[in-house]
Image (spheres, helix red, strand yellow):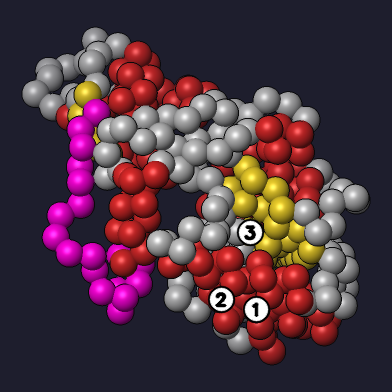
Amino acid sequence: MIVVTAAGGATGTAVVRALWSRGEQVRAVVRSGRPHPDLTALSVDAVAADLTVPAAVEPLLAGARALYLIWPNFDPAEATGATAVLAAARRAGVPRLVYHSVLRPQARSMPHHAAKDRVEEALDRSGLAWRVLQPGAYSANLDGGLADAAVTGRFRSPWGLERAQSLVDLRDVAEAAAVLLTEDGLDGGTFEVAGPEPLTARRIAGLLGSRLGREVTAVDAAPGGPVPPVADYAAHCRRLMFDHYRAHGFAGSPRVLEALVGRPAHTFGEHLDQLEAELRSIRPAGAGELP
């Protein structure tokens, strides 16, 4: 049995699905007892537990042969909370732990990256057999902006127009996670997972426009005003993240991902292909009936 934490989120659900497709038995740890239809459809063992309470998590690890540790996004408790879960995993005798980190955790200008860097450091001291997955930004993160661009004809980029991101498909992230959870010979490895093409906002707008059959223009949507205070941690981190992307981009190599999954990484164009019917059904601003 493999345990996946934060399994009610997009990443956790995708990892559970990838494991299920391999015939693996999965225990999905979710934040609350609310319905999770995507997990129910997979007939997995979904259990509600508070990750910040190690005593609640530890019994769920009994008998597990691996743990995929995802911490909820933009949570200021990650460094201390995830480190406490590592200790619980060691007490429970979990023989393999895979931590869901992020591409460039050492980029201390982004506090949520720095938190993951501290957890990686704790992993090295944990006494566990571990692997680390470091994904870049997901293609799906842009889905809301793509839908807006289908209406307005403008793709708004909070990271500017010059720097590029190697957006990675969540299907690839989940498949790579499944490999790390189930295959031998990977202990102590840190695996970057990035998409196959560094994409500027202009390139994204061009790819979208080619599928919609109309022009889409990239627009610099620079965040205004001061950086939100640390007390508003999620907003604080998002702003510093986009400031970092604007200055440095967020690109990486697909070679590690492709070696793990044994095939080419999905392109952003393939992600758009999945969305094409939905995006083409959206009526552009000021347009009449669609043809």
Stretch of the chain drawn in magenta: 218-235
Image quadrant where residue 164 sits: top left
Q: Which residue is depicted at the point 15% across and 55% down?
A: 224
Residue 196 lies left or right of residue 46; in this view the side is left
Closer to the camera, 249 or 199? 249
Mark sitting on residue 83: 1
Q: Quadrant of the C terminus?
A: top left
Name the residue that disc number 3 marks: 100
First in residue order: circle 3 vs circle 1: 1
Question: How far across and how far down the image is residue 92, in percent?
Answer: 83, 81
Mark sitting on residue 79: 2
Marks 1/2 in contact by CB < 8 Å: the verdict is yes
Q: Which residue is depicted at the point 54% across and 60% down?
A: 106
Of circles 3 and 2, which is in front?
A: 2
Q: Is residue 220 magenta?
A: yes
- Say if residue 109 shows up in the picture: yes
Q: Is residue 100 magenta?
A: no
Query: Hey, what amino acid is under mark 1?
Result: Thr
Query: Hey, what amino acid is under mark 2?
Result: Ala
User: CA separation, marks 3 and 1?
Assistant: 13 Å
